[in-house]
Image (cartoon, grey):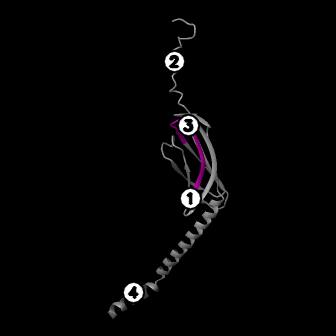
């Protein structure tokens, strides 16, 4: 039993006196400090982010495609990587070929810069849609942006028949 304890103590003394062991410990501690610092700086920078969105038109016909442009600005001196902007899209729309209720756009924003993303949206069914908010979720914090917008989708004009027969039963007319 004492030989096992002595061999363990000998092994630990070799490791603890090794320069590479202490370099590894220093790198792990430095990595942890940098991770905590990055998370705090990113939270402060996300508080200052400005988000806007626009559509190429206010109204479209069902089946038509229009453009949806998102713009996000970073006024801070801190670069933001993997910013996930989430927004709700009402039913009846296809964004970039995906039919889904909640969409996520991922941005990489340099310091003091703006980034634009343009999406292709297809209106599948007629109606009125209202987009209210968008949000960024980072860890346990959520940043909400109020960016209301209305979209009107008119009936599909190709489905309306233009070859209706003339009304032959007018008042006072004979066949």
In this view, the mark in front (1 or 2): 2
Residue 42 spot, x, y in % from top left: 60, 63
Whether residue 27 is situated above or below residue 109 in the rendered picture: below
In this view, the mark in front (1 or 3): 3
N-terminal label among 1 and 3: 3
**Residue position for label 3:** 127
**For the point 55% across and 69% down, which residue is it?**
35
Q: Is residue 172 visible?
A: yes
Instruction: Tell me how far mark 1 sits from mark 3, CA to CA.
Output: 30 Å
Whether residue 69 is situated above or below residue 17 in the rendered picture: above
Residue 150 spot, x, y in % from top left: 62, 41
**Residue position for label 4:** 11
* Label 4 element class: helix
From the viewer's side, name the closer residue of 136 and 31: 136
Instruction: Tell me how far mark 3 sits from mark 2, CA to CA.
Output: 25 Å
- Residues in magenta, as a range: 120-136
Instruction: Tell me how far mark 4 sits from mark 2, CA to CA.
Output: 95 Å
* Label 2 element class: loop
N-terminal label among 4 and 3: 4
**Residue position for label 1:** 137
Secondary structure mainly formed by the magenta segment: strand
Left/right of residue 98 with respect to residue 153 in the rendered view: left
N-terminal label among 4 and 2: 4
Q: Is residue 52 visible?
A: no
**For the point 58% across and 66% down, which residue is it?**
39
**Residue position for label 2:** 164
């Amino acid at each position: 039993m004492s030989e096992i304890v002595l061999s363990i103590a000998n092994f630990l003394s070799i490791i603890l006196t090794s320069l590479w062991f202490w370099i590894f410990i220093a790198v792990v501690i430095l990595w942890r400090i940098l991770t905590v610092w990055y998370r705090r700086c990113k939270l402060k920078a996300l508080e200052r982010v400005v988000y806007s969105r626009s559509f190429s038109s206010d109204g479209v016909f069902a089946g038509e495609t229009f453009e949806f442009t998102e713009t996000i600005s970073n006024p801070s001196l801190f670069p933001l990587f993997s910013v996930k902007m989430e927004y709700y899209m009402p039913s009846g729309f296809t964004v970039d070929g995906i039919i889904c209720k909640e969409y996520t756009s991922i941005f990489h924003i340099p310091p003091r810069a703006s980034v634009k993303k343009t999406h292709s949206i297809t209106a599948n069914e007629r109606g009125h849609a209202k987009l209210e908010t968008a949000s960024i979720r980072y860890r346990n914090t959520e940043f909400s942006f109020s960016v209301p917008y209305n979209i009107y989708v008119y009936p599909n004009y190709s489905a309306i028949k233009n070859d209706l027969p003339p009304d032959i039963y007018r008042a006072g007319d004979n066949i």
